[in-house]
Amino acid sequence: MLILTEKQVRSLLDDDDSVVLDVVRQTYVRHAAGKTVVPHSVFLRFGDDDRNRIIGLPAWVGGEEQAAGFKWVASFPGNLARNMPRASAVMTLNSTRTGQPEAFLAASAISARRTGASAALAAGVLAPDGVDRVLLVGCGVINFEVLRYLTSTCPDLRQVALYDQDPGRAEVFGVRVEQAWPRLRCRTEDDLGAAMGRHDLVSLATTATRPHMDASACRPGSVVLHVSLRDLTANSILGSRNVVDDADHVCRAGTSIHLAEQQVDNRDFIGPSIGELLADGARHADPAAVTVVSPFGLGALDVALAAEVCAQARAKGLGTWIDGFLS
């Protein structure tokens, strides 16, 4: 059994951002081609508590290098007030030959980075050509990771506008961004509607559990990366061009897409999947519509990226090995 700590996982992920993008891209394309198995996520909640949850995501990824595993990820927004990360996660990987567990690793960074990469890949094929500004709504870990990969998929990016319910949090976030990517310049926004109207690329990564905003301020041709899935009203969804990673997965658990489906009793408003768009390598910007991307976050992405991390760890001699773990 190989055991990897969060620090070790991050050190491997930090080596090359293009590796994460390639793994997520390939996995999305495999999923679109039916070469994955992704059962529905399991949501563990605590009585009447609608904010805190732990989610289990099992998955199998086919191909020459198969992988199978399970991610167990907790989201406790109140941790931010405790000066702790909102999310924490662990993963197991199992042999696809014997089924036995082969690796156990901290997975918060894997979860955050596959989320950021999935949104950024969608932006790369959907956003207007040459987009040079982005509005980040919610200044936490996820939007930092979205921005990390947007710097690759949208290489003309130069300006970053920030909006957060806590203005001080946005200021600190901006300093961190400019330290990480000196070519970027950040500014904070205090009028969300006006800011959305000025940007062709918007990323929503909040802790909202119910819709609280609409997309009416967005101009035609803009792309909204609806990473947190529950910010936009059902009417906003129905009035937009919609791209998802998997319709069966995203139409669950009270997401905005799910609420829109319940309102019209069909899924005709959902267009092609992210994997389908990535497969042909072309750009799919639509100057006449507001495009909303709602990536549920497939367990196959976590499993594929964890398998890559473990392969690198073995090659570099990182991690702790426990012989005879099962016996």
Image (spheres, grey):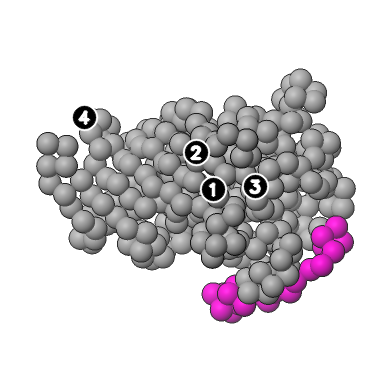
Q: Is residue 326 magenta?
A: no
Q: Earlier in the sequence, mark 1 or mark 2?
A: 2
Q: Earlier in the sequence, mark 2 or mark 4?
A: 2
Q: Amino acid at mark 3?
A: Ser
Query: Residue 267: x percent and y percent?
Result: 72, 25
What label sits on residue 75 in the rendered view? 1
Q: Earlier in the sequence, mark 3 or mark 4?
A: 4
Q: Earlier in the sequence, mark 1 or mark 3?
A: 1
Residue wearing tag 3: 228
Q: Identify the residue shown where x is 75% and y is 24%.
A: 262
Residue wearing tag 2: 55
Q: Amino acid at mark 2?
A: Ile
Residue wearing tag 4: 98
Q: Earlier in the sequence, mark 4 or mark 1?
A: 1
Q: Which tag is nearer the camera, tag 2 or tag 4?
A: 2
Disc 1, disc 2: CB below 8 Å? yes
In the image, 29 versus 39, the foreground residue is 39
Mark 4: give few (<14), some (14-19) or many (20+) Cα within 10 Å: few
Q: What is the magenta range?
A: 175-195
